[in-house]
Image: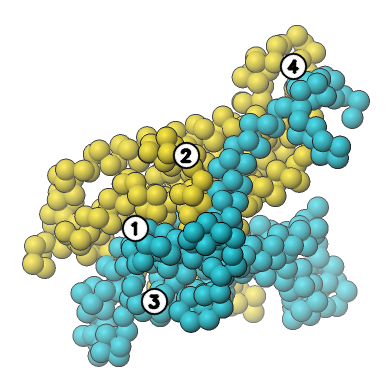
Chain colours: A yellow, B cyan
Amino acid sequence: MKINLTKYSLVGIATLLALIIFVVPYSASIEYSLRGDFGKGHNLTNYYWFIHQDGFLSHLSLSLELGLLAGILNLLLMVPTATMLHLSLQRYKPIVDFICILPLMIPVVSLAVGAEYSMPSFIQNSQFELVFFFVILALPFTFRVLDSALSAVPLKTLVEASRSLGASWPSTIIRVVLPAARGGISSAFFLSFALGIGEYTMTSLLHWETFTTWTVVISQQNLLGSIALSTFSFLFAVALLVVIAIATSRRKIRKNSEIQLVEETV
Amino acid sequence: MNQRTVLPGSEKVRELGISGRKFSIPLPLLPFFIFVGYFLAWPITKVFIASLKSNDNKWTLSNYGPLLHGVYLHSFIVSIKIGLITALLGSIFGGLFAFVIDSYAGPRLTSVLDSISAVFANSGGVPLAFTFLASFGANAGLIKLLKRWGWDLYAEGFSIFSFTGICLVYIFFQAPLMVLVFKPALKGLRKEWREASTSLGGSNAMYLRKIAIPILFPSFVGSFLLLFAGGFSAFATASALTVGNVPLIPLVIGNLINGNVISNKTHLGASLAIGAIVIAFFAMSGYVWAQRKSTQWRK
């Protein structure tokens, strides 16, 4: 009886706190974003406003493009690296581990300053400069995800089996390694994609205008519109991630061996 | 090591890898090292060099002088304070959430809550700033409601563009981040330890004091340090709120580098950037140490 009481009071306190610090502000912001002109009534005026803004589609597509490229580049760089670290080069893992945590140790502002000092002008003059730095910023997360996904499967055995059955290296990678680490690869992709879409610090300090920096620029014209825009992007992100979580957790429940994988990714 | 010949690239390691006497980089890892070297190590090296140069390109330590007194020292202190306060509140709230989720939520709910935490933890940016304006700004529904109930926050001098405001807004990403980083540690507490403690006659309090807290302590400290580093170097939210009157060090560096203040002070920006790296680096080294300490229980 006593244990139940502590249980309910703890759950109660946590739920209440979560309501106060998360649900209340976000619902407040939804309410705010629905306010009509001059505070009269509630409607979708502000949502119409930002959709009809000139830069809306172009900035959104630029951000999606940069995020997509960052995701792809990340996989191209990190999937072979992580695979090799698991196959024959385990002794390099501590070094790579350390390097991959560096982007968390170095404030983004400092890295942006460094980018301005060091990058040659042909890189600085192209918006794709950002893609490289998004990949760097995503490293701590993507490497951990890939690493634990590859640890969860007996990669070495699988690869040796495939090779001794006569498969070539490319076909081993495409038909054995990639499917084995599927979960890790897709989360690594989504992590760097999401980071690319939402990145602000690097983008604004390097003077580029993507969807996030554009949101700040238009807020000077119409604050309510910007709040609507933020609410829209936030709800979009929550919906996307919850769907992904439900989809992957269904697979997890079916496949017991994958549970550990997801636990370790966070 | 005798399987090495079977595995990809290993034959080439000896032929083509860059090899020194003690350390060599094997060919398959070259792309990674080149990428990280060029886009991470090289920029930081350049900042470091710039921080040691004067405006007429001579070596000097004078750029580091302003860090030790006056306005720039003050911004470092303000940022450190923000980091400490928000990390403390964030780790307490987040720790409680993590504990409740870990103990009482089912697997499906847990994974939904995990991804929501991930969204919130990464929302520390522009959307958060506007959400915050909408919830705590002078015209927000919540503030008006409280006013109607007789609690006028703004009359008491509250403002979102203040130190308190910044602390409040940072908790929105600090607490969920704590959930993400601290929950694996809670998972590491084994049921058997509790059973062993109980069957040996230990009370709940004794279990907490002698087993749970000593085991969780390193992870808690590590997570706290990670949160501190995040709060210390956060830029986006504060910048989007255009908090001019709270001199946070990331904002100060951003202004110096963009030449918004005085254009010939970019070398000072470089030395401030190095200062920020040093502080975040110390905090994160503590995090790595604590992480290592805490994972030894999870094997």
Q: Nearer the viewer, mark 1 or mark 4?
A: 1
Q: Going 60% across and 51% down the picture, which residue do you hit?
A: B45
Q: Are marks 1 and 2 on the same chain?
A: no
* B159 sits left or right of B232 in the view: left
User: Quick one: SS at disc 2?
Assistant: loop
Instruction: Please state which of residues A190 and A17 is positioned toward the viewer in this rendering.
Output: A190
Q: On the image, numbered disc 3 is attached to which residue?
A: B246
Cα gap from disc 3 to disc 4, whole angstroms: 60 Å
Q: On the image, numbered disc 1 is attached to which residue?
A: B127
The reply to whether discs 1 and 4 touch (Cβ–Cβ < 8 Å) is no
Q: Going 35% across and 67% down the picture, which residue do you hit?
A: B261
Q: Looking at numbered disc 1 in the image, what kind of residue is underneath it?
A: Pro
Q: Are marks 4 and 2 on the same chain?
A: yes
Host chain of mark 3? B
Cα gap from disc 2 to disc 3, whole angstroms: 34 Å
Which label is found at residue A162?
A: 4
Instruction: Please state which of residues B97 and A232 is positioned toward the viewer in this rendering.
Output: A232
Q: Earlier in the sequence, mark 4 or mark 2?
A: 2
Q: On the image, numbered disc 2 is attached to which residue?
A: A120
* A179 sits left or right of B260 in the view: right
The reply to whether discs 1 and 3 touch (Cβ–Cβ < 8 Å) is no
Give above or below for A45 relative to B88: above
Instruction: Please state which of residues B5 and B144 is positioned toward the viewer in this rendering.
Output: B5
Q: Going 60% across and 77% down the picture, which residue do you hit?
A: A6
Q: Looking at numbered disc 2 in the image, what kind of residue is underneath it?
A: Pro
- Where is residue B212, by image quadrant? bottom right
Q: Looking at numbered disc 3 in the image, what kind of residue is underneath it?
A: Val
Q: Earlier in the sequence, mark 1 or mark 3?
A: 1
Q: Going 25% across and 89% down the picture, which residue do you hit?
A: B155
